[in-house]
């Protein structure tokens, strides 16, 4: 996968996470608690900062989105 394509996917995931959470009327704090991560992690992810995100946490993001009917 080319870097630009990967970067576009991360942007899409970041924007979709924020939009999906907001549409469900879920706060960043509530989502953090649901996923078992810090609120700061949610803020970073919605700002497209996945630098220190573990694979396990990245999978939590994807599972959350899929549970909301988002196709990735």
Image (cartoon, rainbow, N blue to C red):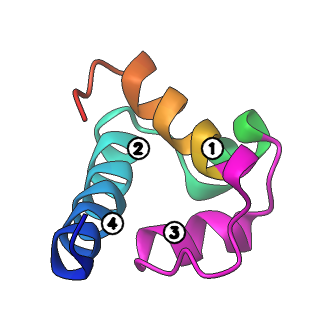
Residue 31: assigned label: 1
Q: How far from the left and from the top, in percent, is residue 14?
A: 35, 63
Q: Secondary structure at mark 3?
A: helix
Would you call the spot at circle 4 few (<14 residues within 10 Å), some (14-19), or many (20 or more)? some
Of label 2 and label 4, which has the lower sequence position?
4
* Closer to the eye: label 4 or 3: 4
Find disc 4 in the rendering and name its residue: 10
Q: Are marks 2 and 1 in contact (CB under 8 Å)?
A: yes
* Closer to the eye: label 3 or 2: 3
Distance, label 3 to label 2, CA atoms, is 12 Å
Range drawn in magenta: 36-57
Find disc 2 in the rendering and name its residue: 21
Q: Secondary structure at mark 1?
A: helix
- Give the quarter of the figure containing the C terminus: top left
Of label 4 and label 3, which has the lower sequence position?
4
Distance, label 4 to label 3, CA atoms, is 9 Å
């Amino acid at each position: 996968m080319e870097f630009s394509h990967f970067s576009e996917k991360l942007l899409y995931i970041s924007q979709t996470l924020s939009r999906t959470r907001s549409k469900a009327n879920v706060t960043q704090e509530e989502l953090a608690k649901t996923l078992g991560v810090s609120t700061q992690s949610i803020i970073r992810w919605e700002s497209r900062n996945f630098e220190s995100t573990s694979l396990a946490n990245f999978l939590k993001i994807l599972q959350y989105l899929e549970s909301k009917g988002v196709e990735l």
